Image (tube, grey):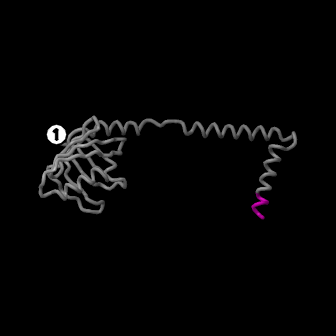
Amino acid sequence: MLQVMFWYNSWACYRSIFCGPEKKKPMRKYLSLCVIAFCLFCSCAGSKRVTGAGDADAALYRRLLPGKWSVISMKRDPGAPAEQLAGVTLSFGTDSSFAGKAPCNSIAGTYTLNGPQIRLGQIISTEMACPFLEQESHYLRLLENNISRLSVTADKLLLRDDAGNLLLEGVREN
């Protein structure tokens, strides 16, 4: 019953403003102008493209990532201790391709880069046996399924998961 009275009072208030006697015309004009101004403000506010830092960051990542990196450590899981890697490399090209050496085999694939977001996919590898196959399978799984973000400087590469956990660490080779 209380809701019915509320809706009735709301309708009565609306009717008195917009459908009332002629002496309330200035109020109707004022409210109409406010509604139009609000709609214009809202439509313009969402259409602007912000440029600057985001675009500059994306260009920085595209400039710093290409080259050969030695992957020096890997975390199989976010809470796991870092494992030291030897002889593992990743070389990123400017054409969205990468190649490298996993603990046992040579690998290659593609990557997409969108600012600090990176996805590695279509990974292929040779199939030679070695004592580090278990480590290699975890490494390849991290590359293809878990890596989604990166931090890169002139000499350091950090590959992270969606939660920001560090999974692979690399240093630039000269």
Crowding around mark 1 (Cα neighbors within 10 Å: few <14, some 14 to 19, many 20+) is few
In the depicted view, which residue is nearer to us: 125 or 44?
Answer: 125
Task: Please give the name of the residue rendered at 26% of the width and 39% of the height, measured from the top-left corner.
Answer: 97
The one nearer the camera, 53 or 9, is 9
Q: In this picture, is 104 found above or below 26?
A: below
Locate residue 36: give its quadrant.
top right
At x 14%, y 49%, the residue is 87
Q: Quadrant of residue 78?
A: bottom left
Position of 170 relative to 30 (above/below): below
Q: Amino acid at mark 1?
A: Asn
Percent position (x, y) of residue 7? 76, 56
Count of marks, rendered view: 1
Quarter of the rendering occupied by the N terminus: bottom right
| Left or right placement of residue 64 versus residue 20 in this view | left
Q: Position of residue 68 (x, y in %)?
A: 20, 41
Main SS of the magenta segment? helix
State which quarter of the image contains the C terminus. Answer: top left
Q: Residue furthest bottom?
A: 1
| Corner quadrant of residue 85 | bottom left
Q: Position of residue 119 (x, y in %)?
A: 32, 46
Question: Residue at point 33% right, 37% down?
Answer: 60
**Secondary structure at numbered mark 1:** loop
Q: Does 99 sit left or right of 16 as displayed?
A: left
Q: Would you name the residue on which mark 1 appears? A: 174
Q: Nearer the viewer, residue 102 or 60?
A: 102
Q: Is 101 colored magenta in this rendering?
A: no
Q: Residue furthest left?
A: 130
Q: Which residues are magenta?
A: 1-6
* Residue located at (45% from left, 35% from top): 51
